[in-house]
Amino acid sequence: MDDILEPLRNAFEGQIDFHGQRLAEILSTVLLVLFGAISFVVGYIYKDIHLTLWVGLGGTLFTGLVVVPAWPWFNMNPEKWLNSAGKGPEVLVDGVKVH
């Protein structure tokens, strides 16, 4: 059953990928600055604060749709973690060996 659920779990939850996190951070910063500048220019040209806010809100929502989901391009370099069932390094804590 885990063989069936694992690909679905990875698709919805994603894996830890530090390169993908960096890409998401850069994308969010660039898109928010870009849409902020566009909304300012549009508001300045049309002299309409409501239009400025709506363009800014639309850009923020678009940025959220691009950055928040676990898209495949954010999970191209997942981190390899130690298997919890395997025998890992032993650490001595208060005279007791801990795995």
Image: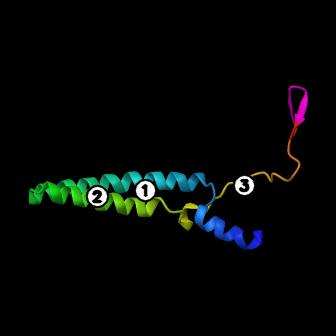
Sort mark 2 into few (<14), some (14-19) or many (20+) by Cα contacts within 10 Å: some
Residue placed most toward the observer, 76 or 3: 3
In the rendered structure, are the residues bearing label 1 and label 2 in contact, judged by CB atoms less than 8 Å apart?
no
Residue at 39% of width from left, 51% of height from top?
A: 29
In the image, the segment drawn in magenta is: 91-97
Most extreme residue toward the top is 94
Residue 88, quarter of the rendered image: top right
Q: Is 28 or 7 nearer to us in this picture?
A: 7
The residue where tag 3 is placed is 80
Image check: 97 left or right of 1?
right
Residue 94: say if magenta.
yes
Instruction: Determine whether, in the image, residue 58 is placed left or right of residue 94.
Output: left
Q: Which mark is residue 50?
A: none
The 10 Å Cα crowd at callout 1, few under 14, some 14 to 19, many 20 or more, is: some
Residue for point 55% across, 56% down: 20
Amino acid type assigned to the residue bearing label 2 in the image: Leu
Task: Name the residue tied to disc 2.
Answer: 57
Q: Amino acid at mark 3?
A: Lys
Gap in angstroms between the C-alphas marked 1 and 2: 17 Å
Q: Dividing the image into 4 quarters, which one contains the N terminus?
A: bottom right
